[in-house]
Image (cartoon, rainbow, N blue to C red):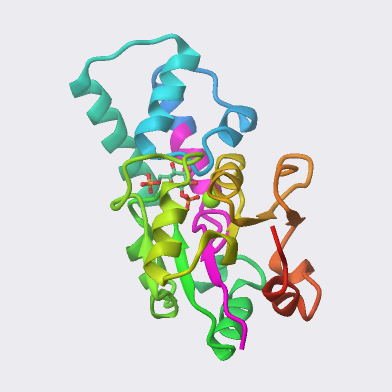
């Protein structure tokens, strides 16, 4: 049977946490009197915590000491962790659980490729940690998306070539990272935002019924 490496982003693809990152960053930006709307937020999706804060400070033209920088990052993460306290299986994105189970049934390898340092506890909380053979997250990488490092680690650990790897992403930076790696990129979200992806769906539930088979024969 044909096999491919199926690599999933976490926030905004598997679980609906993107909205909580948004709220936490917005509060952080407000504390520094920096404007932060959906437009700015879009540019932070898939971007690591440290790079996100750097971008926000650039937008506000503000410089802070390393100590305050660390304190602000901690503050954002505390807000975020507080917001996701009540996270449960109802926050799994539509169709994702079935899609993962279908892949498992076909014995297809599954990896996580996320910028988040909170990935493992979130997957555990949702009861789906065991579905992932490989987890590459913000604790394992040095380069932030759009750098392909996170996805290259994931395919390497699954023992697959980049041409045999498929990435599911909700962010522009993540789609660019998958493309830079030479992998097939499937966008989850709006076509007009994720137009660089090889294909885009609003949700997993919008994919055709036999889409896994289509992906197994898809070429970059
Ligand atoms: P944390 P993903 C990314 O996760 C989020 O999209 C992004 O908004 C967040 O800043 C980043 O993780 C770091 O997350 O603060 O939890 O370490 O989309 O790559 O799964
Ligand atoms: Mg994401």
The reply to whether residue 87 is in sight is no
Placement of the N terminus among the 4 image quadrants: bottom right
Q: How many marks?
A: 0
Q: Position of residue 43 (x, y in %)?
A: 57, 32
- Is residue 156 found inside the magenta-colored segment of the image? no
Q: Is residue 137 above or below residue 57?
A: below
Quadrant of the rendering where the C terminus is positioned: bottom right
Residue 90 in percent (x, y) is at 56, 71
In the image, residue 52 above or below residue 119: above
Give the image quarter of residue 73. top left
Across and down, in percent, residue 162 comes to 53, 59
Quadrant of residue 31 in the image?
Answer: top left
Residues 119 and 85: in front is: 119
- Residue 207 placed where, x, y %? 77, 69
Which residue is found at the position 75% from the left and 74% from the top?
Answer: 214
The quarter holding residue 57 reads: top left
């Amino acid at each position: 049977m044909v096999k491919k490496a199926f690599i999933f982003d976490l926030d905004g693809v598997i679980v609906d946490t993107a909205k909580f990152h948004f709220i936490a960053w917005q509060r952080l930006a407000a504390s520094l009197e920096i404007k932060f709307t959906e437009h700015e937020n879009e540019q932070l999706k898939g971007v690591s915590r440290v790079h996100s804060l750097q971008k926000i400070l650039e937008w506000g033209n503000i410089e802070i000491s390393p100590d305050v920088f660390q304190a602000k990052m901690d503050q954002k993460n505390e807000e975020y962790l507080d917001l996701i306290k009540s996270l449960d299986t109802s926050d799994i994105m539509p169709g994702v659980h079935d899609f993962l189970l279908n892949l498992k049934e076909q014995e297809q390898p599954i990896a996580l490729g996320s910028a988040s340092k909170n990935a493992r506890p979130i997957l555990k909380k949702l009861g789906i940690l065991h579905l992932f053979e490989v987890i590459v997250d913000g604790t394992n990488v040095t380069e932030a998306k759009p750098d392909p490092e996170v996805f290259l680690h994931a395919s390497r650990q699954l023992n697959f070539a980049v041409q045999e790897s498929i990435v599911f992403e909700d962010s522009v930076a993540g789609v660019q990272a998958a493309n830079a790696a030479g992998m097939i990129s499937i966008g989850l979200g709006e076509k007009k935002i994720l137009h660089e992806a090889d294909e885009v769906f609003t949700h997993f539930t919008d994919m055709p019924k036999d889409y896994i088979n289509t992906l197994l024969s898809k070429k970059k």
